[in-house]
Amino acid sequence: TKWVYGFGGGSAEGRSDMRELLGGKGANLAEMCNLGLPVPPGFTITTEVCTAFYDNDRAYPDGLNAEVETALASVEKHVGRKFGDAKDPLLVSVRSGARASMPGMMDTVLNLGLNDETVEGLATVSGDRRFAYDSYRRFIQMYGDVVLGVDHYHFEDILETVKEDKGVSLDTDMGADDWAEVVEAFKKKVKTELGEPFPQDPREQLWGAIGAVFGSWMNARANTYRRLHNIPASWGTAVNVQAMVFGNMGDDCATGVCFSRNPSTGEDRFYGEYLINAQGEDVVAGIRTPAPLTEIEKQESGSDLISMEAAMPVVFKELCDIREKLESHYRDMQDMEFTVESGKLYMLQTRAGKRTAKAALRIAVEMCRDGVISQEDAIRRVDPAQLDQLLHPTLDPEADRKVVGMGLPASPGAASGQIVFSAEAAEEWAGKGRKVVLVRIETSPEDIAGMHAAQGILTSRGGMTSHAAVVARGMGTPCVCGAGAVKIDYANKTMMSGGVTLKEGDVITLDGATGEVMLGEVATLKPDLSGDFSQLMEWADALRRLKIRTNAETPEEAETARGFGAEGIGLCRTEHMFFDPERIVSMREMILAETEKGRRTALAKLLPYQRQDFIDLFRIMKGLPVTIRLLDPPLHEFLPHGDAEIADVAKAAGVSEAIVKRRLLDLAEANPMLGHRGCRLGISYPEIYEMQARAIFEAAIEVSKDGGDPVIPEIMIPLIVGKKELEILKAAIIKVAAQVEDEKGAKLKYLVGTMIELPRAALRAGEIAEEAEFFSFGTNDLTQTTFGLSRDDASRFLDTYISKDIFAGDPFVSLDQEGVGELVSIAAERGRATRADIKLGICGEHGGDPASIAFCEAQGLDYVSCSPYRVPIARLAAAQAVL
Ligand code: ADP
Ligand code: MG
Ligand code: MG
């Protein structure tokens, strides 16, 4: 096996399609080299080394050492300097790089190779002693923190103290001797903390850093990030070792981050930030506020800093050319890092840029219109789950805003919540069901879980490419960053802004599209789904085969889903129609009645409500298919609680409270989910389903009088285990239909079908299809019963199961294709064997999950049905599923 891949001098051993082996960073560094772009030479230690490292008790594979030496020698040759040479040392950066970009991994170590001797060499060669010692102190700080585990605040404290002593406030005002003093203090600190001196041997430093990158693959931060993003631990990370270039050698030096298009809006305009006389980390860490790259950006943002376009026009032009070259090569928006050393430009990274959903849509649609990518590519480019960001409200521009602060519009969307000042508090409060806005001076990868829990994120420091901004955009969380006027006091848990002091728990609203910070909760508006959104949806609709229906029972839900493009209702849960205060009493009366007569009396009171519900739904759905599930839930969900409710029911039924209470005892079940529910109720009390069928049929005839497409209700029987139940219940439904036709002198068209939600039903699907005209896979119950796992109780151990890799994920979120999926597949096959044109769909929560939708496509189902807000996601996922 080859463990190390070199790059430099205009060519590379790797390529961009080798990201599994080289990680994203390494593969793209190689590709940029191959494209002839200016990239400092270096080498990549593969992800296979990481895997081997963990397979062998954290030992490196044989031969690695020799390959690293060879690769290092080649870098030395390209640069013309030797690693560890006291006179003219080669310095390197050590950078982690997994397949997917992953905050939470080890931070990069820059300037590696410096020690007490080489720093003098660097000072002499560069003719800049200040620069040499500035680089050395940075190196000790980074290496000390990320490799040796000396907490960074030790270094920060020392730096503050030295600055105070000297009466200096800015890093840029520190001189060579000042930095030398800092270096001594840093080394002393390392020695007292670790009991060992700071390593002086460059090779020891190199292997220390490499080991730290591999070690960080399994740290807590990385594990959390992987869990949140479904990245398997088996992928491993690569390590990149690369010759240093210096952006901190004077005013003809700079470092920056740029995007080939605006990552927030998607606009096709070069966008970025840079800092003169700085090293890479400074931009992201938010230590100094970066300047805009372009003049137009400077004007629009009102920044008083000088743009790169104005400060370094020649290098800027070169960077513009690279922007075009890389974007047309990768045919996607690029996120790039660069450094300018003494007027010479170097590229240090490129990758597909993280973007908001809005930007993703705009970029995909515009690139397709410009002929850069195909419609299929455009569809593939947008993550369906990300669309969720666009479906939710934005701030009402008319609403009153008490603006108390302003920052950068880092990630769009509106967020209101109670402020908290730490990631831990955000997690804790959110765990209690509260909406929080996380307020931090800046964020770091340790804050990931808290950022995830927050509705919105506000920082007082850092630019559009700071950690907070990048992560928030990735998560689709509204974020305002770099709000410099917001003064945050962690100790007292307060923030001061615009003359007001807010404490933990006070409510603020953020507008991530404008950067405004507002007091209290501000009113919101419905989202606008025209433009790029409808264009991409149109392309997706033209491509997909699966129909998309919705799970809806109220007119509002049906209306919302229609607005999102639902093509029918796949699941109308009739029991949800009985919780209304007016109806629940009659419902309880029906359940608690001891005789058929008693039940019929109560059902007669429910009939008009139920009929009106269906009339409303049919009118909204205008002839689109509507699948109605007859009463399903365990009856205990409807039982009265407490004396007052019991008294109400007793009164309505005209019986004593004692009788109601005794009946309650009769009805108690040890395991209601597997008890007297679903069609079992229909079998015991046929009058319930008869009433429901009558309501459906009468509504269908009523609405048919409106003209337009006829209503063809699909009546669905839940929880059957075999053919017999369906036979009995279908016959009863047909009888009601005939009666209604007679009474109204009208003809009815309808289908009778069944849920497949128990393993036995899936297995007996062949004979069930003799009766059923359609199957709808109720994958929630099918998952519960296949796993023998209660949805309401699973959360206690699910995390453990997932972290121990027993389950790949939550089977209630993404369909278990191996087990539950096999039952679906068996049922579909046996059902079709009996009835070739049987209609098949799924109506569990899985209907809105892209991976599950891909499975449904593979099974050739006719439709998926999901909650209204997931309809657009399902439309796009269904299109991706046929690609
Ligand atoms: P991340 O993945 O967190 O962006 P990087 O490895 O890209 O970490 O590096 C962090 C910063 O250090 C970036 O700004 C990068 O451009 C800079 N950097 C990395 N390697 C070098 C190098 N060889 N010379 C100069 N700057 C570098
Ligand atoms: Mg980077
Ligand atoms: Mg069910």
Image (tube, rainbow, N blue to C red):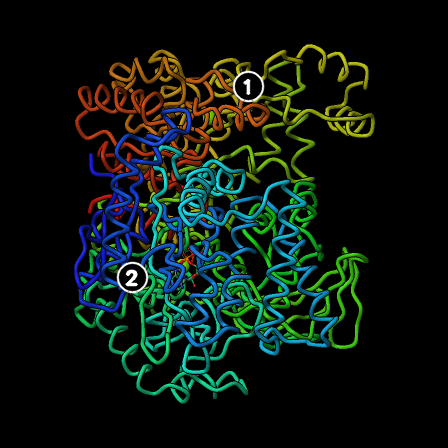
Residue 738 visible in the picture: no
Q: Secondary structure at mark 2?
A: helix
Q: Give neighbour class at mark 1: few <14, some 14-19, many 20+ (Cα, 10 Å).
A: some
Q: Position of residue 56 (x, y in %)?
A: 37, 24
Q: Earlier in the sequence, mark 1 or mark 2?
A: 2
In this rendering, position of residue 706 left or right of residue 637: left
Query: Image height check: is 859 above or below 383?
Result: above
Could you say where residue 257 lies in the image, as x and y percent from the top left? 41, 69
Q: Which mark is residue 536?
A: 2
Residue that appears at 19% across and 65% down: 329
The kind of residue on which mark 2 rests is Leu
Q: Identify the residue position indicated by label 1 in the image.
A: 673
Measured from the top left, where is residue 750 in percent x and y?
32, 35
Residue 873 percent across, percent down from the top left: 37, 50
Secondary structure under badge 1? helix
Tell me if the residue at label 2 has its CB under 8 Å from ligand 2: no
Residue closest to the eye, 198 or 10: 198
Q: Amino acid at mark 1?
A: Met
Residue 750: image tag:
none
